[in-house]
Amino acid sequence: MTSAALRMLDHRVRFLVALRKFLGTLLTLNFAVCWGAPVFIQGWLFHMGLHRIVRPVFSLLDRSPALRRFAATYIYRGAVHVDYFATAIFLTVGAAISLGTVFGWQICFGSLPWWLVAIYYFAWVGFGGRGMGAAYTFAHREGHVAAGRMYRPWIGRHIGNIFENRVGVWYGIVPHIFSTSHILLHHRLDGGKADPVYMWDLDRTKFSDLLLYQWRLFVYMTGFSSLWEFRRQRGVRPAIGRAYATLRRGMLIYWAFVPGAIVALLLATGSSVSSALVFLFLIYFQPLFAMSSFLALINLAQHAFLEYDAAGRNINHVTAITILEGHDDSFGEDDHLAHHYFPGVTHDRLPELQASQRREWARWHGAVFKRISIFEIAVLLQLGRIDRLIDHHYVDFSGELDRDELVALFTRRAQRREMSYEDYEFRYLPQLRERVRELVRRGVCENENRAYIYQAHHDLGPDLGIAHN
């Protein structure tokens, strides 16, 4: 390549990085303006004392023997999933009431007043974030038990995954994205290179890098980055081709069928074109913006720390964090290590698993914290307050390092990058399939699927070549 071509390429890369950072800034501002008050006010009120009122009411329903018998007999296949039922009822009823209200008002009066939109956003978030958190949790769990297999056969056959593919569209969730991308990309690659939500080309303590990650998460939430990655990996294993077709169908539902149906309904009932489009943006698409920004922070914290063993392989007990006695745990979601590396362990068996992991946490100075939420960890990372995270929340199973050593260790882990953002996006990914095939040619991996996993889990060196053969 000539020097002139290299300069043009460099200018193009710098322009694209600046553009993505600008778009990430817009997403951040949108979250602050539209969703900041519902998230932070309700979170603050909930933790300041509202939980003393809300939790007893919820517990009354959750502990009802009759309700639990009904759920076990008619709704869920596994006994452990009965624990979801009360939360699912609150979420579904709340979503139906709030959506019915905004649709009814729009149909009756032709537009939505700002105060009703604000009320809808507060209802969407839920007390302490439990509305949006429950929607994401249930869609996530259903994705791990695809094709409606969490539920009794009549539900699985006729409805399928209720929250991933039905209710979830109102929470910015593209149908089938969990049962396809989340399983075959994020879990198969465990957050490593080629995962659409990869983050180890960014400094997790740097706000400008968070802006780039905001854009990456938004593109992931739309489905497009996963679809592109499935297309790149087609032929690696049969499930990839099926996932590509399934996710494409889910994206068609989210981006065409549902918006088309909303606009058609509103136009047919008297709304103007402009008013129908405003409704579509505020009620249907804004939750996608909200969830992508929120999940950017959540994901950044869940895989905030990066460390390698002597062979250059990611250390699981560092790269996926665990929170004990968390403020906002949702059916075991706080134990991200268990979620990635012990996915068969349900939330009721987590204490037993966590006890068995203490030796490994001690060995690697694992990423284990207590009495804090994942959102709070994300905020502390962005504020550069790893010292506060260590002082008040770190669980030290080894006792080998003093406080300053732990702060220095976790600061390095939070700032460590496998490569620059520019190298990853514009050099590594475009050549990824060839790198994978080279691993197979060299005999490092037996097939391309294993090579994708290998490159995701190993440090391949600063020259982006194939190291640690």
Image (tube, helix red, strand yellow):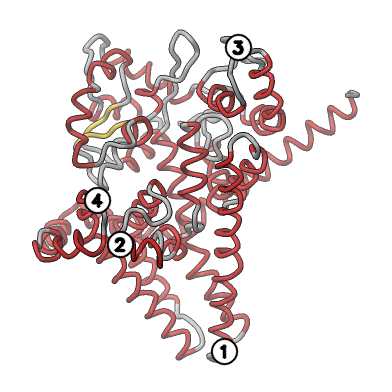
Looking at the image, is 432 positioned above or below residue 58?
above
Front residue (pair 56, 26) = 56
Q: CA distance from mark 3 to mark 2?
A: 48 Å
Position in image of residue 390 (x %, y %): 28, 25
Position in image of residue 53 (x %, y %): 12, 62
Secondary structure, mark 2, is loop
106 left or right, relative to 275: left
Q: Earlier in the sequence, mark 4 or mark 1?
A: 4
Crowding near the residue tagged with mark 2, few <14, some 14–19, many ≥20 C-alpha atoms within 10 Å = many
270 left or right, relative to 409: right
Q: CA distance from mark 4 to mark 1?
A: 43 Å
Q: CA distance from mark 1 to mark 3?
A: 62 Å
Q: Are marks 4 and 1 in contact (CB under 8 Å)?
A: no
| Residue denoted by label 4 | 78
Q: Earlier in the sequence, mark 4 or mark 2?
A: 4
| Residue denoted by label 1 | 268
